Amino acid sequence: MKIALLGYGKMGKIIEKIAISRKHEIVLAVGVENLEDLTIENLQKADVAIEFSTPGSVISNIEHCFTAGVPVVVGTTGWYDQLPELKQRCEQGDHTLLYGSNFSVGVNVFFHVNKLLAKMMNNYPYYDVQVEEIHHMQKLDAPSGTAITIAEGILENLDSKSEWINVLTTDDKSDEEQAASDQLLIESMRIDSVPGTHTVIYDSEVDTIEFKHTAHNRNGFALGAVLAAEWVHNKKGFYSVEAMFDFNS
């Protein structure tokens, strides 16, 4: 395939390397240094676009892809409050968009098992649950999109929790907010050079159960994004990353 990269930072460069190793061609790579290259004409040279930019530019990038008629895989998070509107525009315009908080194969296995675990733990209300996530200091959003997806999977299957709240901890800051009994706490920690660690903790007076995913580097995320581009190529419609994985067969 011919691929356009919208967002050419650390993640974009890793995606480029993996895409080329899988015999694809990068026909456009747009970063902060060459925003003027993001034109409809340049986008139309691509079979599919992979979007890993920032929450401030993702909507504009998606709109460019819609106008160009190019399928887009969106890995940027922090825009999901506009998701219903984008879904409607995508479907009404016969466009193609696949989004996900995390494209890593391992993380998506984690998402699925997390839901099964929450459904099982719903039978044991004397366990309390919280989510912890650790990322590098440069991560712009908190909680991470991955942590939100984990929390939503728990909320769907656990009667004792009605909503999630977030506490952010960095080297020079720690929020003081405490979770009510019906709130699911997501504790976000920002530490240098951590690609991403997510842990679900079920705790009781007698024991603790921890379910954890640890990313060793960004390669798993990047490979997943390229696999998503391969999957969505020649498709029409609005998809979440879950559509790539047939865990229920």
Image (cartoon, rainbow, N blue to C red):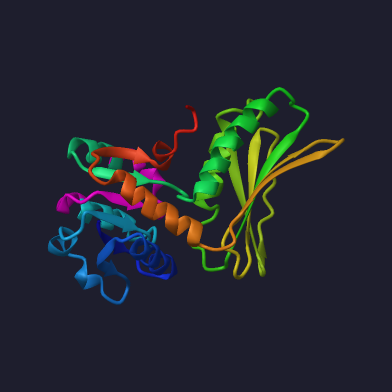
Q: Residue at x 66, y 57 (%)?
A: 175
| Residue 82 appears in view | yes
Image side of residue 83 versus residue 138, left or right: left
Most foreground residue, 120 or 176? 120
* Looking at the image, residue 106 lies above or below residue 60: above
* Looking at the image, residue 71 lies above or below residue 20: above
Most foreground residue, 202 or 80? 202
Name the outermost residue toward the right: 206
Instruction: Tell me residue 145's x, y (percent).
Output: 49, 50
Instruction: Tell me residue 247's x, y (percent).
Output: 49, 33
* Looking at the image, residue 59 lies above or below residue 20: above
Name the outermost residue toward the left: 41
| Residue 161 appears in view | no
| Magenta stretch encompasses residue 83 | yes
Most foreground residue, 166 or 206? 206
Q: Residue at x 35, y 61 (%)?
A: 19
Image side of residue 105 versus residue 233, left or right: right
Image side of residue 153 versus residue 225, left or right: right
Q: Which residues are magenta?
A: 66-85
| Magenta stretch encompasses residue 100 | no
* Looking at the image, residue 51 lies above or below residue 121: below
Instruction: Tell me residue 179's x, y (percent).
Output: 68, 42
Which quarter of the figure has residue 49? Answer: bottom left
Q: Residue at x 56, y 47 (%)?
A: 147
Image side of residue 180 versus residue 54, left or right: right
Most foreground residue, 57 or 99? 99
Query: Where does the N terminus fall, quadrant-wise?
Result: bottom left
Instruction: Tell me residue 15's x, y (percent).
Output: 39, 63
Which quarter of the figure has residue 14? Answer: bottom left
